[in-house]
Image (cartoon, rainbow, N blue to C red):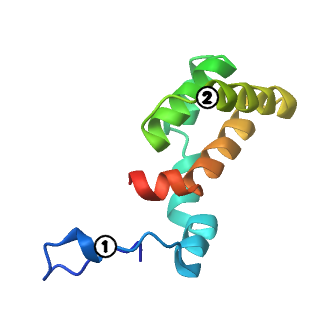
């Protein structure tokens, strides 16, 4: 579904970088991802239990999803969003969903 070549071919050159409708629908509506994000023992739940502040939440979510620290602009916007939402778990889940549905996630995973 995500453009990997068939097992018969060892060449990654057959992989496409275009996002298909099937990929989009799976990422947006897929129960596997939804269940993983809201799981009571998942990363977000553990961070909330540790009373992580917004900065820590943003950093950990970026590292988990796109394998890098957020830029200054991304950090500022993400922290502002978490502060606006008020509920850290809901805001962190929204941020994780947004990053999973970004092109950066598709190309890093």
Residue nearer the viewer, 1 or 18 = 18
Position of 62 relative to 52 (above/below): below
Residue nearer the viewer, 17 or 79 = 17
The crowding category of the residue bearing disc 2, from other C-alpha atoms within 10 Å (few below 14, some 14 to 19, many at least 20), is many
Residue under label 1, please give it: 4
Residue 94, image x, y percentages: 70, 45
Residue 1, image x, y percentages: 41, 77
Q: Image point 68% across, 21% down: which residue?
A: 54
Position of 86 relative to 103 (above/below): above
- Element on which disc 1 rests: loop
Q: Image point 84% across, 34% down: which residue?
A: 85
Q: Quadrant of residue 101?
A: bottom right
Residue 44, image x, y percentages: 57, 35
- Element on which disc 2 rests: helix
**Quadrant of the snapshot with the C terminus:** bottom left
Q: Quadrant of residue 93?
A: top right
Instruction: Farthest residue to the front: give it.
Output: 13
Position of 100 relative to 7 (above/below): above
Q: Image point 66% across, 32% down: which residue?
A: 74
Would residue 2 appear left or right of 76 to someone viewing this image? left
Nearest to N terminus: mark 1 or mark 2: 1
Residue 24, image x, y percentages: 59, 71
Residue 58: which disc?
Answer: 2
């Amino acid at each position: 579904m995500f453009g990997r070549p068939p097992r018969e071919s060892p060449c990654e050159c057959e992989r496409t970088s275009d996002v298909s409708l099937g990929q989009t629908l799976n990422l947006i509506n897929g129960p596997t991802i939804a269940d993983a994000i809201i799981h009571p023992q998942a990363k977000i739940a553990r961070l909330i239990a540790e009373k992580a502040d917004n900065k820590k939440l943003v950093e950990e979510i970026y590292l988990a999803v796109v394998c890098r620290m957020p830029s200054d602009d991304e950090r500022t916007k993400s922290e502002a969003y978490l502060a606006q939402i008020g509920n850290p778990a809901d805001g962190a889940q929204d941020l994780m969903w947004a990053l999973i549905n970004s092109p950066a996630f598709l190309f890093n995973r």
